Amino acid sequence: MLDGVNVALGVSGSIAAVKTVELAHELRRQGADVRAVMTDAATGIIHPWALEFATDNPVVTEITGSVEHVELGGYDGWADVLLLAPSTANTIGKVASAVDDTPVTTTATTALGANLPVVVAPAMHAPMYDHPGVLDAIETLESWGVEFVDPRLEEGKAKIAAEESIVLEVARSTSDRSLAGKHVVITSGATSESIDPVRVLSNRSSGRTGRAVAKACYVRGADVTVVHDGPDLPYADVIEVESAAEMLDGVRSVVDDADALVSAAAISDYTVEAAPEKIRSGQQLSLDLEPTPKLIDTIRADYPELPIVGFKVETSGDDDALVEKARETFERADLDFVVGNDASVMGEDTSRILLVRPDSVASHRGSKTEIGGHVADALAAELTE
């Protein structure tokens, strides 16, 4: 996600500074090179040696004749992005006022003057976060293009955001923004059809691929809506649904202003009239299954111009058979392209997909994150064309 990206990590004197060792490790796991800059207050909370170990680079704790702030964040500086995490109320106010009395604020002023992307992850007590001056400073910085990763408001504190959210915002700030200004609706995971109040018909889809596509679209600048039976996501608006009918209604509720629909969910093909009470066990039972409407067909009928990406899962293990079925889906619903994969990858961490068009097939193998990136890139290419 951050391959080849140089991150200057500015650490201020919040107790959340203790989390920066793991944050630096996570940035590096995602491919980034990291160099840390610390305020004097931060060094009283976490020793610079800890961040030197975590980043595998020397840590800047003072600005010397080597003009470290310019070397990191100047016009031809080392960094691709400046990440202020954690950022205290003091640091936010100083950066908004161009007050340069710490290595972090001096580096920030330099980075902003050089038009370097800046991402801020605040951490402080909640009353400080609600201070009118702090809110004004945040508004000022946002007007300059600074991106904020909202803190978690818990126990009277504005706690630093989760590592995933911070890393995603850094990736988004340094991406090619190939989907900037686009609203992408993505269906993900399995749906469930109630048999009775405690039993359902469902499938083995984990939703990892759909969430990976959603995350990749967000990183590339899109506004993302995910329709699924799953958790809230830091990178998307979520519409929570359970059944195939609810998923169709959920998509209909947001697709009016969408630029594309990615139908990655494994939607139930059949539903059943649910019993009002629990069916007792120990008896023979037959279920009358009724087919559910095909989501992509229904949406295509209502939105003939909407770019739609379909997914096709087969169990044969034969690429030729998978491509044939994918092209049938392509033609039936007039899709932009179809993502084909074998059912054996359901729930796995890695996957192999075929991007199928009428005159071409592209094969990709890798982690679900990498697969999500390939699908997002293919979608961006379609929307650009």
Image: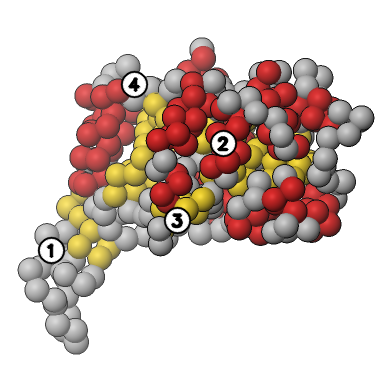
Q: Is residue 87 above or below residue 139?
A: below
The reply, left or right, for residue 136 in relation to residue 366 is left
Give amino acid for label 2.
Ile
Q: CA distance from mark 4 to mark 3?
A: 44 Å
Asked whether 221 or 373 is in front, the reply is 221
Q: Is residue 102 visible?
A: yes
Q: CA distance from mark 1 to mark 2?
A: 55 Å
First reached walking from the N terminus: tag 3 or tag 2: 2
Of discs 1 and 3, which sits in the foreground? 3
Mark 3 element type: strand
- Of the residues under marks 2 and 4, which one precedes in the sequence? 2
Q: Earlier in the sequence, mark 1 or mark 3?
A: 3
**Tag 4 or tag 1, which sits nearer the N-term?**
1
Q: Disc 1 on helix, strand or loop?
A: loop
Q: Nearer the viewer, residue 350 or 111?
A: 111
Foreground: 76 or 242?
Answer: 76
Q: Give, as a three-letter code, the residue at label 3.
A: Lys
Residue carrying label 4: 306
SS at badge 4: loop
Give the image location of residue 111, x and y in percent.
Answer: 70, 25
Which picture quadrant has residue 139? top left
